Amino acid sequence: VGISLLIYVMDWIYGVFMTTHMAPSARFVRLESVVMIRVPKPEGFQMKGSSGYCYICVPWISKYEWHAFSAFKDPVDTDYVCFVVAAVGDWTKKLHGALTEPIDRRNCLYGPFPSPFEMASDSDHILSIASGIGITAALSVIQSLADTRKMRLIWICRDASLLEFVLDYGAKFDDDAYSLIFYTG
């Protein structure tokens, strides 16, 4: 037990001091039932591969709560990373309710950490299936591999504003493969 606990504590200390980043001016935009967060990549922040996730702390909502969300590279500016947060729990509903208009506020990021979607780069033909907010993990794979792989997408979404956001925000869909989007709202 002693060695396992020591390894855990050392890993935690490394994470706190080496992979925690302050983002002084993240952009928070409220949509119908989600919040889009666009963060300038802090110094030392490196997303390896096509996808990943980070823990986010939003001090003006709660100073001590960290929540994990899928990260995807901003399709417009590679110096930014984006998160889309669905208002489904207490903390996320509080964040969604606190926004009435787009604002720039600071937040903290812990990560990034690799995603299970990293294995997608080992395949030539990729089928991503997502529902609702799950599109964020699929978007990062689509954005990074669409030029070199055949990308297929099946997405079921009931939030019209999320659907518009993804389609308007520059998602690259493969012209040679199918992208099926089912709007159920």
Image (cartoon, grey):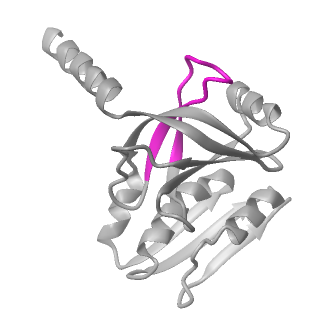
Q: Residue at x 79, y 50 (%)?
A: 31
Q: Which residue is drawn at 57% across and 68% down?
A: 76
- Residue 21: horizontal and vertical position, in percent? 42, 34
Q: Residue at x 43, y 56 (%)?
A: 51
Question: Residue at the top extreme?
Answer: 2
Examine the image and state in which quarter residue 19 appears. Answer: top left
Which residue range is magenta in the image?
A: 52-70
- Residue 28: horizontal and vertical position, in percent? 69, 44
Please state which of residues 54 and 77 is positioned toward the viewer in this rendering.
Answer: 77
Give above or below for 47 relative to 120. above
Q: Does residue 143 show up magenta in the picture?
A: no
Give above or below for 47 relative to 153. above
Q: Is residue 52 left or right of residue 85?
A: left
Q: Does residue 68 show up magenta in the picture?
A: yes
Q: Is residue 177 left or right of residue 158?
A: left
Q: In this view, does 115 lie to the left or right of 138?
A: left
Question: Residue at the left extreme?
Answer: 3
Q: Is residue 126 left or right of residue 176?
A: left
Please identify the quadrant where the N terminus is shown: top left
Does residue 158 appear anywhere in the picture?
no
